[in-house]
Image (tube, grey):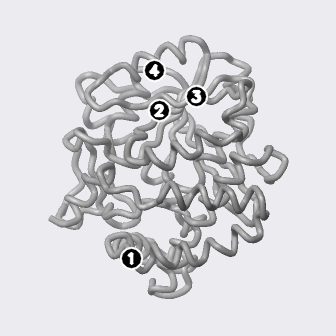
Amino acid sequence: MRGMRDRAAWHVRRERGSSLGILTMVWLYRHLGRAIARVLVYPIVTYFFLTDAAGRRASRSYLNHLYATPEGGRALGAPPSARHVFRHYLEFGLTILDRVGFWLSDRGAFEFTVRGNEHLERVARDKRGALILGSHLGSFDAMRLLAATSPVDVHVLMFTRHAARINAVFARLDGPESEGNSRVRIVEIQPGSVQHLLEAKACIERGEVVAILADRVPPNDSERVSRVKFLGGIVALPHGPMILAGLLDCPVLLMTALRTGERSYEIHVERFADRVHLPRDRRSEAVGEYCQLYADRLASYCLLAPYQWFNFYEFWNEDDADVST
């Protein structure tokens, strides 16, 4: 039962990132340069690696599931060890460093390659609006930086309270998303409220874009899940994003930004569905089918960038023998 408790409580885990530490990193990046800030990532990551036993277990669990697949075995090269787990932590640290860079630098400081840009161009051209499904794979901030230059307004639905201190630090910076011409807006998801749903529907009706992360079960909603296959195990995925897609009745895209090198990202955009149809007589079953499709696509990108899925909590429910909705 430990895994179930850990997974359900991801949103209430105490923030491990200190606002003072982040501010120090920001100061070093801004005044001494990225090179020195990058060197300091290693001792910071080492500290969190040594002191976060639950996170290490979750990382090893993920890497073990990945390694058990033929493609994952080739990607990791050897059974997951502490070295692999540390690399997983390090990749997260470097992504955070880039996040600081996104907020302090202009877009030209980073190189972006967009695969599937024609899907974004179609959204802008047709003015029908679209829902983008993201995940905790890669850098969501890289996608937000790209969206800030989009001709279409983008509204990101997020549960932000679990990272209030870190978000407050970034909100104080004079980065590209804090400029008056940014076309990205954060809409906080309030548990038990439908206000964010009403705002999302209004955005689509104006031909704008709504984005949401679809790989974590939100607080107070642990019953509305589908148990699907993911990297050889069984996981719970939330119904909310798929129900939202059905409600909005608009094109749905899948999008992820993978770090490919120093200041280099590859953003993948693909069609998920022209519209998500949830017939009343088989609504739960249909939601489960879309959740499984999402899980399959997420797994394919995890295999492409095995150290960039940043869910450092127990994700699998090994007690489930069958997949059901």
Q: Residues within 10 Å of mark 3 (few under 14, many from 20)?
A: some
Depicted 66 relative to depicted 254: above or below: below
In this rendering, position of residue 55 left or right of residue 302: left
In this rendering, position of residue 147 left or right of residue 19: right
Q: Kindly report which numbered mark, 1 or 4, lies closer to the viewer in this rendering.
A: 1
Q: Amino acid at mark 1?
A: Thr
- Residue placed at 47% from the left, 21% from the top? 200
- The mark that comes first in sequence, 2 or 1, is 1
- Element under label 3? strand
Q: Residues within 10 Å of mark 1 (few under 14, many from 20)?
A: few
Q: Which residue is mark 2?
A: 157
Q: Which residue is mark 4?
A: 248
Q: Which residue is mark 3?
A: 185
3D distance between C-alphas at marks 3 and 2: 9 Å
3D distance between C-alphas at marks 1 and 3: 35 Å
Q: Which residue is mark 1?
A: 51
Which quarter of the image is occupied by the C terminus?
top left
- The mark that comes first in sequence, 3 or 4, is 3
Q: Kindly report which numbered mark, 2 or 4, lies closer to the viewer in this rendering.
A: 2
**Is 121 or 86 nearer to us in this picture?**
86
**Is 109 or 2 nearer to us in this picture?**
109
- The mark that comes first in sequence, 1 or 3, is 1
Q: Which mark is residue 214?
A: none
- Element under label 1? helix
Residue 294 spot, x, y in % from top left: 45, 46
- The mark that comes first in sequence, 2 or 4, is 2
**Is 126 or 179 nearer to us in this picture?**
179
- Residue placed at 43% from the left, 43% from the top? 214
Q: Amino acid at mark 2?
A: Leu
